[in-house]
Image (tube, helix red, strand yellow):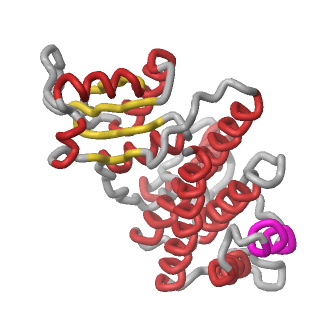
Amino acid sequence: EDSTVTELTFKDVGQGVLQRLEVMLGIKPSIKPELALEPTAPSVTVPEVIPTLPDLADLLVGRYPGRILLVRDAPQFPGTQSSQNILVVVDREPTKLRLPIEKTFTEHYGSHPSPGLLLMEQEGYRTLSALIGLAEQEETGRIYFRASAIPAPAHDDAQKAIELQLQRYGRSLDAADKRIKFASISLQNDFPEEVSRPLRQALGLALTAHLSLVKDKAPGEELPSPHLVEKELVATGRIPVDLAARLERIRVLTAPPTEAEGKPNILAMKTAEEFINTIKELIDAGREEIARQGL
């Protein structure tokens, strides 16, 4: 109170320091608003992703491997509420799958209008096709997914284990795809320093997803060793040699900086775009493997 100081200047301090000073003095200092505010991060404009029916079909096939036989536009049957309906044919137990598939529709479309769901099993679809000629309408209707082969019902424990393994595989690929989208948004909004980390996470998720089919280990973001990738994925032909070489380059250039390097490594835009496309190629190969094993 006896001090003759009448003015204080603050630089690079946050609101918390100023609040503590206020308590110590028992008064409210005269502080310029621009100094009292915490620094705010620049806003990022996230482009809106419009949900599409092909993406919905891919999501259904990935989440329920071996169960989805057909995803297509449906005729406007009497009593249907939506102006657009999607017919989903499953190999068995449509009643048990209805709620999970409806939740998938809601998750995929979010605030956007969702089409109506018509769900039936294989024999019901065949009967309906015979009655109204639905199969013949496939030439003019939109088919978003059609199984090339119809799997036999899986009742034994071995087949159930395979289904669970493929579901785990698909979830990991979905997670890798989300990391890729985050990296793309960061790149588009001029935040190159935020690209390497989601790229490395996506690479770990996609590689460990592939390994989960040959090793009894859950997928994750941690990158497997180059030796393990070579032995289990490259040498066995699951991943082409040229793709493996490009993936290894991503591993090296997205590695966290050493103490000597100090600042994080920032990828050039062209390099980051190349890495995004390469990991997408790995994810697509995984989805093809799911379809092949599930069907």
What's the residue at 77%, 70% (across, down)? 236
Left or right: 269 as drawn, with respect to 171: left
Tally of numbered discs: 0
Based on the picture, tell me whether residue 91 belongs to the magenta stretch. no
Q: Nearer the viewer, residue 237 or 267?
A: 237
Q: Is residue 137 above or below residue 154?
A: below
For the C terminus, give its image quadrant.
top right
Is residue 231 on the magenta stretch? Answer: yes
Asked whether residue 264 appears in the rendered view, the answer is no
Return the x and y of residue 104 as percentages of the image width and height.
43, 32
Q: Is 222 above or below relative to 217?
A: below
Q: Which span of residues is magenta-colored?
A: 226-235
Question: Along the horizontal axis of the image, is 189 left or right of 3?
Answer: left
Q: Residue placed at 37% from the left, 39% from the top? A: 70
Q: Residue at x 57, y 53 (%)?
A: 292
| Residue 155 visible at all | yes
Q: Position of residue 242 (x, y in %)?
A: 64, 84
Tell me if residue 284 comes above or below residue 150 in the rendering: below
Residue at the limit of the structure toward the front, as seen here? 130
Q: Quadrant of the N terminus?
A: top right
Determine which quarter of the picture holds residue 208: bottom right
Viewer-proximal residue among 109 and 260? 109
x, y (%) of residue 197?
A: 64, 65
Residue drawn at the location 33% of the way across and 52% of the way down? 49
Q: Main secondary structure of the magenta part?
A: helix
Q: Is residue 71 above or below residue 43?
A: above
Q: Position of residue 108 (x, y in %)?
A: 39, 39
